[in-house]
Amino acid sequence: MKKFGLLLIGGISAMILLSTIGPMIGFLVSIALLYFIFKQFLKTDSTGGKIGLGIVGFFILLASIHNAPAIIGVVAAYVLYLVYKKWNENKQVIVKETDPFVNFEKQWNDINN
């Protein structure tokens, strides 16, 4: 039953991730362009250049805001990662030794340390 729940959550998050690939790419491109415009804005000494880069940067900022569904895609990718990690988790099984001398030696080592 636990595996079925993980499969269901993983399937839903995979569909959400695939449906938001476009906005994620657009968001990545607009943020990269915004970064380069900001770097040029800091290098420019002329007032006209700063005004022009500011206007272009503002429009690219608006474009990156319109790609806000990309945040949902990033969350879906993180949920998919958590499901993958939980699916491949190994369960630790504690085996008790029935040999009394093994337990005695362990206790003796604990007392000596």
Image (spheres, grey):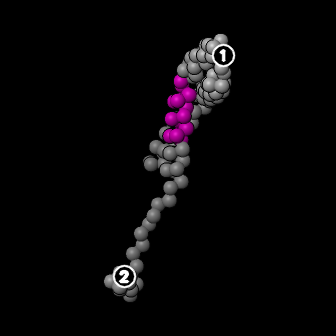
Check the picture and name the quadrant holding the C terminus. Answer: bottom left
As rendered, which of 86 and 30 lies closer to the eye?
Answer: 30
The mark found on residue 92 in the picture is none
Percent across and percent down for residue 4 are 48, 45
Residue depicted at 50% across the width and 40% down the height: 79
Q: Quadrant of residue 61?
A: top right
As rendered, which of 25 and 7 lies closer to the eye?
Answer: 25
Residue 72 lies within the magenta run:
yes
Give the foreground label among 1 and 2: 1
In the image, is 103 to the left or to the right of 39? left
Percent across and percent down for residue 62 are 57, 17
Residue depicted at 55% across the width and 31% down the height: 73
> Few, some or many C-alpha atoms within 10 Å of disc 1 (few <14, some 14-19, many ≥20)?
few
In the image, is 94 to the left or to the right of 85? left
The local secondary structure at tag 1 comes to: loop
Magenta highlight: main SS: helix
The mark found on residue 113 in the picture is 2
Query: Which residue in the protein does label 1 denote?
Result: 46
Kind of residue at badge 1: Ser
The local secondary structure at tag 2 comes to: loop
Percent across and percent down for residue 50 are 63, 16
Residue depicted at 53% across the width and 24% down the height: 68
Visible residue check, residue 22: no
Residue 107 lies within the magenta run:
no
Magenta residues, start to end: 68-80
Going from N to C along the chain, the mark reached first, 1 or 2, is 1
Relative vertical location of residue 47 with respect to residue 86 in this rendering, above or below? above
In the image, is 25 to the left or to the right of 103? right
Visible residue check, residue 64: yes
Residue depicted at 38% across the width and 84% down the height: 109
Relative vertical location of residue 10 with respect to residue 40 in this rendering, above or below? below
